[in-house]
Amino acid sequence: MAKEAVKITELDERKVKILTAVIRNYLETGEPVGSRTISKYTDLQLSSATIRNEMSDLEEMGYIFQPHTSSGRIPTDKGYRFYVDNLMSEKEREIQEKEDLIIEKADKLEAVLKQAAKLLAANTNYTALVSSPETHRNKLKFLQLSKVEKDSLLAVIVVEGNIIKNKMIQTEEEIDEDTILKLNLLLNTHLNGLSLEEINLGLITLLKERAGMHTEIVSSVIDAVADAIRADEDLEIYTSGATNMFKYPELMDSGKATDIINTFENKEELEKIVNASLAENNAGKNEMQVYIGKEMASPAMQDCSVVTATYDLGDGMRGTIGIVGPKRMDYEKAMGTMQSLMNQLDEIYKKK
Amino acid sequence: MAKEAVKITELDERKVKILTAVIRNYLETGEPVGSRTISKYTDLQLSSATIRNEMSDLEEMGYIFQPHTSSGRIPTDKGYRFYVDNLMSEKEREIQEKEDLIIEKADKLEAVLKQAAKLLAANTNYTALVSSPETHRNKLKFLQLSKVEKDSLLAVIVVEGNIIKNKMIQTEEEIDEDTILKLNLLLNTHLNGLSLEEINLGLITLLKERAGMHTEIVSSVIDAVADAIRADEDLEIYTSGATNMFKYPELMDSGKATDIINTFENKEELEKIVNASLAENNAGKNEMQVYIGKEMASPAMQDCSVVTATYDLGDGMRGTIGIVGPKRMDYEKAMGTMQSLMNQLDEIYKKK
DNA sequence: GATTAGCACTCATTCGAGTCGAGTGCTAAC
DNA sequence: GTTAGCACTCGACTCGAATGAGTGCTAATC
């Protein structure tokens, strides 16, 4: 399930060459590849029979397998992993970086991200996913209660990255302006500058005690504000180009594409992927992640691969962008396009 | 393109019976229905030959057609329209109403609507769509500028129905609290109680004049507020159960299902439908609409039908809910389930 | 004049047989 | 260790026959 680095030592040079050839060929054609093809299209001067023996070995070691007796081989998850870790040519990645995805700068981060997803999907022919920045580590910057009507208050909460949360609070009886003023002061002095996840139950009860007077109403207001702060329902995930999944016969025929799109709709599985990617990038080094087939927990996703990257635009605006494709996706291109997009995002938000 | 009422007089009783039988049968099986089937399963005691003659007439009149020579008939759009307008049994609709969709009341309307869509999709096996309430007719209830940081203001706008809009405004130089206070007063006295669409350019320039002092900064702030008010980007449309479209072979094989799901992703076409439905219900009578095939402008949708209803929960919270299915959808069930859902929505928001 | 039985015809679908070709594994020779 | 050769497997494709649901038309019947 988890990603394991494959030691390069297990395979001798010739096996590596053959494995590479099998994978490259399969990525292009999508058809099982046979010994004859390999013996022709590699620089190794070997007959198909020799290749067959080697391939038989590779199969035993779990890098490739046959969909049915007496057909060519296709890579296993382990094979793909080896390819992604050791075989991908850096050159191609460079070339791809020059690609011109042009993100227009928009007012809202959300709009930019949606657009980014659209571009990714259009350029790669895979499905793109983008998560809105997670906010629970962000620090509270501004908090204000206002009376909107006699019996309703509006709480506005702004955190780093200018992400805004709102909450309407219905009160049982009217609260006078004076009390609101005091509440605002109280909340701000105690909560300002704290990260959302630091605002826990203990702190809330403390606040309530401090509030002192007419506990009932005030405490219900405080509760509501706390609710709003902690609500993490805001991990939104957008997808774009979901139907691109239908372009790949190996997913289409078996009806797996439908499952995958369903998974997209439910978001939960996507959340897992996003979170995994965020966790892996916590250390700070911003690298791309690749998850292949079973490396993802979600059963519906076991027939695809995902390339993810974490964007970090400062001010706590940190989230994940991903490309979902079939396992035989063009990893070079996907990673190249992703890299290019990330660079652009960085630039846009540095100039700001 | 537009819906035309079909006069019932065009068809004699026998033709009506036969047409009904054809449609009912086709709705069930999804296969072209032949004369023999009809002669067996109707109370008319007629031979298949007679039915054939009648069917030939019906074809000439445009109610049914043959997918290829010498196969059974299937209904045309006109046929479906006639069925929906005149033939659907009210009884079944009653029965369906008893169905128990149970919407949990949630804090936010948005959450309730999303849930409603999910329920609809799950119960009907079609795709559900829900539009967030349109707000441009709603009246402004509360407007407030606050200073969040030295160079940034936050505008909070609340309209009827407690729909909240936010906008961060970057200012070139710091604005002092006093000015903000004045601005708030100015904006509120002039704009409060107006509907969003009443706040037009003329009004804005007037406001700017009134503002008087340091026009540059203040007017840019006013502009930003006006922008935020008018931004109608907030017509969100959610879909649920998109992949249900794949359950219907007539859409699946031809690849039309993919087109349709693509259309869902782009929202624009859906917007048209939503707007059409809203317009039609403007008069106030809250009825369900049915759009069949070509009655919708969108080309990708010409192979499906949509049942829409307008929800109106008071306070200007008005939007559209729809069910999208193949043309041979079970209109009775769809409309029944929809009705039931609308009733529940009403109830939830009346008790509130 | 409406209804029906009968017949010739059409056309999509299914099925099996046959062929093809890509591929393998194994063995024996180099 | 490498390779040529051969028997074998198995999916994909083609083709024609059989099937069967359905039609339109005509002539007989009520």
Image (cartoon, coloured by chain):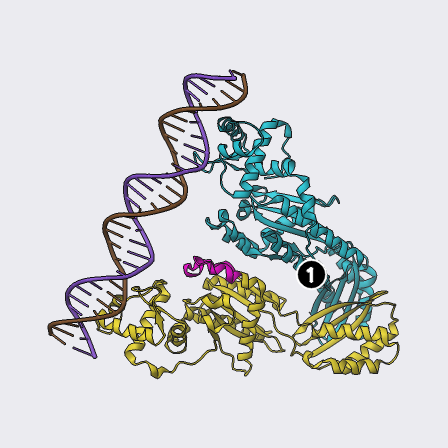
Chain colours: A yellow, B cyan, C brown, D purple
**Residue pictured at 51% horizontal, 74% vertical:** A309
Answer left or right for A219 relative to A352.
right
Q: Which residues are magenta?
A: A241-261
**Residue pictured at 52% horizontal, 82% vertical:** A285
- Label 1 crowd bin: few (<14), some (14–19), many (20+), radius 10 Å: some
The chain letter for the residue carrying disc 1 is B
The stretch drawn in magenta includes residue B114: no
Can the viewer see residue B11 in this picture?
Answer: no
Q: Main secondary structure of the magenta part?
A: helix
Answer left or right for B142 relative to A176.
left
Q: Nearer the viewer, residue C3 or C23?
A: C3
Q: Nearer the viewer, residue B123 or B139?
A: B123
Can the viewer see residue B58 in this picture?
Answer: yes
Q: Tell me where residue A162 appears, x and y as whole percent.
A: 67, 73
Q: Tell me where residue A175 appears, x and y as whole percent.
A: 87, 70
Q: Is residue C8 above or below residue B76?
A: above
Answer left or right for A336 relative to B288.
left
Q: Is residue A257 above or below residue A307?
A: above
Q: Tell me where residue A186 appears, x and y as whole percent.
A: 81, 80
Q: Is residue B199 above or below residue B66?
A: below
Write down the residue under mark 1: B110
The stretch drawn in magenta includes residue A255: yes
Q: Tell me where residue B334 appears, x and y as whole percent.
A: 63, 47
- Label 1: which secondary element: helix
Quarter of the view holding residue B207: bottom right
**Residue pictured at 53% horizontal, 48% vertical:** B300
Quarter of the view holding residue B162: bottom right
Q: Where, quadrant-wise, is the C terminus of chain A in this rendering?
A: bottom right
The three-letter amino acid code for the residue at tag 1 is: Glu
Q: Nearer the viewer, residue B43 or B284?
A: B43
